[in-house]
Image (tube, helix red, strand yellow):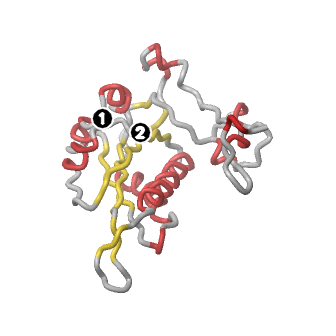
Amino acid sequence: MTSFPDRDTGSSVAPFILNRWSPRAFTPDDITRDELLNIIDAGRWAPSAYNAQPWRFIYARRNTPDWERFLSWLIPFNRAWAENASAIVYVASRTVTDSARTGEPVDAPSHAFDAGAASVLIQLQANQNGWFTHPISGFDKELAHAGLELPEDHVVHAAIVLGHRGDTNQLPENLRDREAPSTRVPLETLAFEGRFIPPTSKS
């Protein structure tokens, strides 16, 4: 597993988290259905409110009938590099859940939060299995919703592009310098004890 010293700044965060990053250069390798499902299965084990498990994962693999259709919903910028990947997994969630009391659908306020948690587990599992992922929101959500044949009470949030890392030189010149793990802002700008402190008022 590749490690990135620039991300290891004394943090006690587990290496398998620090080693996850989002490249755009992929090699046009095929992935088997079983390989992909073994990765997606990690998302099934995410926590969710009332164990409702609202997430849904709809996928296509390169060199299969659905591949071009899944690519067609991406904005041109994303399609230009994603077309070299091995799979695209659209992440959606059900916006309602069945009431334990009445059995009728009621709002599920945490459906997006829960789907996000599942998405992270998929990305971490992919990295553990030797694959890279790049989550994106740059796609036509109305076309994707219709094309995926999602019910009205479902919403599509993001797509996870998955593949083996490719040669950076295949990317447009303006993207090559960005093909490296990104840094993060300091923890003290994100975590607060007791109350939120706006940046302008921090001492």
Q: Amino acid at mark 1?
A: Leu
State the residue at coordinates (33%, 67%).
96
Q: Amino acid at mark 2?
A: Ile
Does the CB distance between marks 2 and 1 fall below 8 Å?
A: yes
The vertical placement of 87 against 183, above or below, is below
Numbered mark located on residue 133 in the image: none
Instruction: Provide the secondary structure element on which disc 2 rests.
Output: strand
Instruction: Provide the secondary structure element on which disc 1 rests.
Output: loop
Q: Name the residue that disc number 1 marks.
A: 74
Which of the two residues, 33 or 74, is positioned nearer the viewer here?
A: 74
State the residue at coordinates (42%, 63%).
109
State the residue at coordinates (69%, 48%).
191
State the residue at coordinates (51%, 51%).
120
Numbered mark located on residue 136 in the image: 2
Q: Residue 143 placed where, x, y %?
A: 21, 42
Mark 1, other Cα within 10 Å: few <14 / some 14–19 / many ≥20 = many
Judge left or right: residue 16 versus residue 134: right
Which of the two residues, 38 or 159, is positioned nearer the viewer here?
A: 159
Which of pointers 2 and 1 lies earlier in the amino acid sequence?
1
Judge left or right: residue 27 versus residue 69: right
Which of the two residues, 155 or 77, is positioned nearer the viewer here?
A: 155
